[in-house]
Amino acid sequence: MDELTPDQRAYLTAIATTYPGWHIVVERGWWWATKHTPPTREQKAAGVLTQFARPGPHEMVAALNVQLGILARMGAA
């Protein structure tokens, strides 16, 4: 994991707390999310990802919200 600024560390803690179904790390400047429970075949077909990266914390939160929206529509959130 990268050496984070205090602000980045605070974002990381907040994101990890808000989205407990995902493991969040920062590597080489990119924010990575890995789903703790792999998505089912149906979830994958609907667009749920096992892992993805975004360039910053705000983009990560937006992407996680999309993932939660998909799961909620499927009744799995």
Image (tube, rainbow, N blue to C red):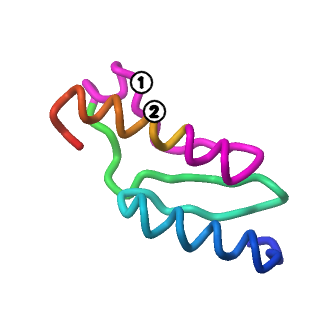
Identified by mark 2, the residue type is Val
Q: Which residue is mark 2?
A: 66
Where is residue 60? Give x, y as percent: 61, 47
Q: Examine the structure image and report whether residue 43 is included in the region drawn in magenta.
A: yes
* Numbered tag placed on residue 75 in the rendering: none
State whether residue 76 is above or below residue 45.
Answer: below
Where is residue 37? Give x, y as percent: 32, 53
State whether residue 62 is above or below residue 34.
Answer: above
Query: Which stretch is magenta?
Result: 41-62
Residue 70 horizontal side relative to residue 67, left or right: left
Alpha carbons under labels 2 and 1: distance apart = 9 Å
Quarter of the image with the N terminus in it: bottom right
State whether residue 36 is above or below residue 40.
Answer: below
Is disc 1 placed on a helix, strand or loop?
A: loop
Residue occupying the point 56% across, 62% down: 24
Query: In which image quadrant can residue 67 be found?
Result: top left
Q: Which residue is mark 1?
A: 47
Query: In which image quadrant can residue 6 be found?
Result: bottom right
Q: How many marks?
A: 2
Q: Examine the structure image and report whether residue 61 is included in the region drawn in magenta.
A: yes
Q: Front-most of 68 and 47?
A: 68
- Furthest toward the left, the residue is 75
Where is residue 66? Give x, y as percent: 45, 33
Instruction: Determine whether label 2 and label 1 are within 8 Å by CB.
Output: yes
Q: Earlier in the sequence, mark 2 or mark 1?
A: 1
Where is residue 55? Give x, y as percent: 77, 45
- Furthest toward the top, the residue is 45
Identified by mark 1, the residue type is Gly
Count residues near mark 2 (Cα–Cα under 10 Å), then give few for <14, some for 14-19, many for 20+.
some
